[in-house]
Amino acid sequence: MKYRKLGKSDLNASVVGLGTWVTGGGIVWGKNPDDNESIRAIQASIDAGVNLIDTAPAYGFGRSEEVIGKAIQGRRDQVIIATKCGLWTKDKRGSFFCEFDGRDMYRCLRPDTIREEVEMSLRRLGVDVIDLYQVHWPAIEPEKTPIAETMGCLMDLKAQGKIRAIGVSNVCLDEMKEYEAHGVVDTNQPRYSMFCRGIEKDILPYCIDHRISTLSYMSLEQGLLTGKVTMDRQFDKNEWRSNEQWNPWFKPANRKRVLDLLASWKDLTVKYDCTLAQLAIAWTFHQPGVTHVLCGARTQTQAMDNAKAGSLALEPADVDRIRNEVIALGEPV
């Protein structure tokens, strides 16, 4: 496993991190996860060298954090815990975002709700300090808390020893610059994959220049890049993967194109003795500015398979080949 610093902090995190949205369950994931299996997956990840575990209160409305708390008992010194704030469901503070799993969710980055959130996360995780605390989504109108106020609160929490490092997620370049103007930003967590490369234009170059680590999510495109989502796979209407606006690559015509492309990389999986998923993960952290890749896992097997990607060293010519062939595939129809 390779390890890289998280921004300007002293935290040394595995290039493959464990993302735990699926651990929280919910209607968007179809089959509900088994908590005991989730615990085994988390512990298998740690055993395989993964020390970065990313979660959020919004993942199962605290369930993901609670499961992680159980999984890391007695192993706290082996993990870097990253969680988030800003998606609020306790009352109507903030700006309405969406209805999610039967609850109204608000984007809220007020100092008072952040202080409540951090205490709830500490309690659910069973820890004294959160290693990386991230703003989940930017605030929006009508209650758009100024970034200066949000960052001021986060810096206070850092000074109090409740958090060690600060990150942002799902922000545009101007928002990132403003966060940096009011404190120390160590990480950025954007959606990024070989099929979703928009942040290469501005976000990634800025992160490189300002020593901000990038924790990419959805880098396997919700399993599509594993090659295991075949043409006969059907999804429940409530699952994310049935939402063609969210991910048009799952449409049958587009899925067929992706599967054909993945099949053409068999020589690469043989060369590196890896799976397609491991190839895609490794390709991602070989991109300039992408320092860590978050990967979900329901089972021990998935967790261990993802972790193996952290030791792959792809040759530059193969990294370029994958990029060029993805570009040649074109956009989804």
Image (cartoon, helix red, strand yellow):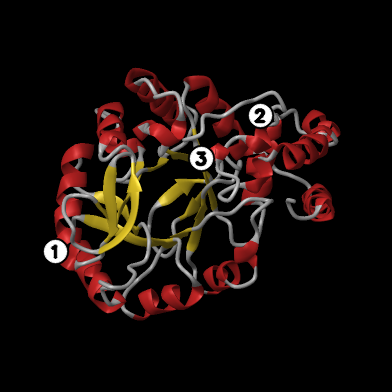
- Residue bearing mark 1: 112
- Badge 1 amino acid: Asp
Q: Are marks 3 and 2 in contact (CB under 8 Å)?
A: no
Looking at the image, can residue 306 be seen? yes
As shown in the figure, which amino acid type bears the numbered disc 2? Answer: Val
Residue 149 x, y percent position in the rendering? 23, 75
Of circles 1 and 3, which is in front? 3
Residue bearing the label numbered 3: 240
Tell me if residue 238 comes above or below residue 143 in the rendering.
above
Decide: marks 1, 3 in contact (CB < 8 A)?
A: no
Q: Position of residue 147 (x, y in %)?
A: 30, 75
Element under label 1? helix
Q: Report whether 113 appears left or right of 1.
A: left
The CA span between labels 3 and 2 is 14 Å
Q: CA distance from mark 1 to mark 2?
A: 43 Å
Q: Nearer the viewer, residue 101 or 316?
A: 101
Q: Is residue 331 left or right of residue 79?
A: right
> N-terminal of the two: label 3 or label 2?
2
Tell me which residue sits at (42%, 39%) in the image: 51
**Residue 25 at x, y = what percent?**
37, 31
Q: Position of residue 267 (x, y in %)?
A: 85, 32
Q: Give the position of the N terminus as an image quadrant.
A: top right
Position of 271 with respect to 188 (left or right) is right
Numbered mark located on residue 229 in the image: 2
Mark 1 Cα within 10 Å, few/some/many (few <14, many 20+)? few
Using a 10 Å C-alpha cutoff, classify the residue at mark 3 as few (fewer than 14 neighbours), some (14 to 19) or many (20 or more): some
> What distance separates the C-alpha of mark 1 from that of mark 3?
32 Å
Element under label 2? loop
Please identify the residue farthest to the front as the structure is shown. Answer: 237
